[in-house]
Amino acid sequence: MPLVVRPSRIHSIGVFTNMPIRKGERIVEYAGPRITPEEADRLYDGAPRTYLYGLGDGKTIIDGEGLGAYLNHSCDPNCEIEEIGNRAWIFARRDIAAGEELMWDYNLYDDDSPAPCHCGSPKCRGTMYSREWMAKMRRKAREKKAKAKAGSDHRGSAF
């Protein structure tokens, strides 16, 4: 499949197709060495960007390299990632025209550092984190706030 890496309006560089792609077509593998979550943390702690993909088994991280790692995030993507066996493949979610940038929803999780989204879609949620992860972070913040308030309510005089 003729794919090309070039500058992207979303972020740095992206992957573009030179020919139309049909909905459901397998496009490219998200390939790279397999490492553990602990290795990923050790290797990339404090790194400004990573190309990591966590497989559904929760034990394997793909340290992305090659074309698959350069697809940018979008909240309204034209691609999706699917695990088949122990491999991650990128498929077309819809028909994609020649010249379009290929994008998938990263649905990040398991972190609280900023991950702003710059996809520009009318459906943009403002972050690359998944809706579920953001809901979890909001619950955690409310609980922390309630706990702090409860602690301050018990302070003061005994009179």
Image (spheres, rainbow, N blue to C red):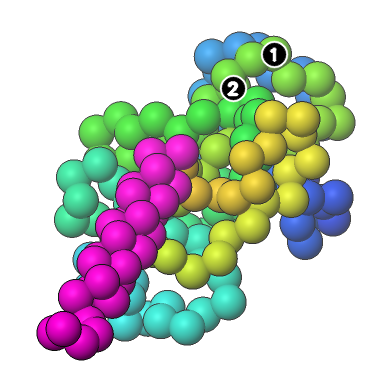
In the image, 116 versus 83, the foreground residue is 116
User: What separation in Å lies between label 2 and label 1 (alpha carbons)?
Assistant: 7 Å
Inspect this view and state whether residue 147 appears: yes
Residue at the left extreme of this rendering = 158
x then y, percent, for residue 152 = 28, 76
Tell me the kind of residue under disc 2: Ala
The dominant secondary structure in magenta is helix
Q: Is residue 96 left or right of residue 25?
A: right
Vertical side of 67 occupied by 36: above or below: below
- At horizontal 19% and vertical 75% (from top left) the residue drawn is 154
Query: Is residue 71 found left or right of 50 in the rendered image?
Result: right
Q: Tell me what residue is drawn at x 76 percent, y 34 percent.
A: 121
Residue at x-position 68% and y-position 37%: 124
Residue closest to the eye, 136 or 31: 136
Disc 2 crowd, CA 10 A, few/some/many (<14, 14-19, 20+):
many
The label on residue 95 is 1
Q: Residue 146 occupies which quadrant of the picture?
A: bottom left
Q: Amino acid at mark 1?
A: Asp
- Disc 1 element: loop
Residue 112 shown in magenta: no
Q: Compare residues 142 and 26 and report the one nearer the observer.
A: 142
Figure check: 148 above or below 61: below
The x and y percentages for residue 25 are 56, 18
State yes or no: discs 2 and 1 in contact (Cβ < 8 Å).
Answer: yes
Residue span colored magenta = 131-159
Q: Residue 114 placed where, x, y %? A: 56, 65
Can residue 61 be seen here? Answer: no
Residue 111 lies left or right of residue 4; in this view the side is left
Q: Which residue is mark 2?
A: 92
User: The residue tagged with tag 2: helix, strand or loop?
Assistant: strand
Please state which of residues 54 and 159 is positioned toward the viewer in this rendering: 159
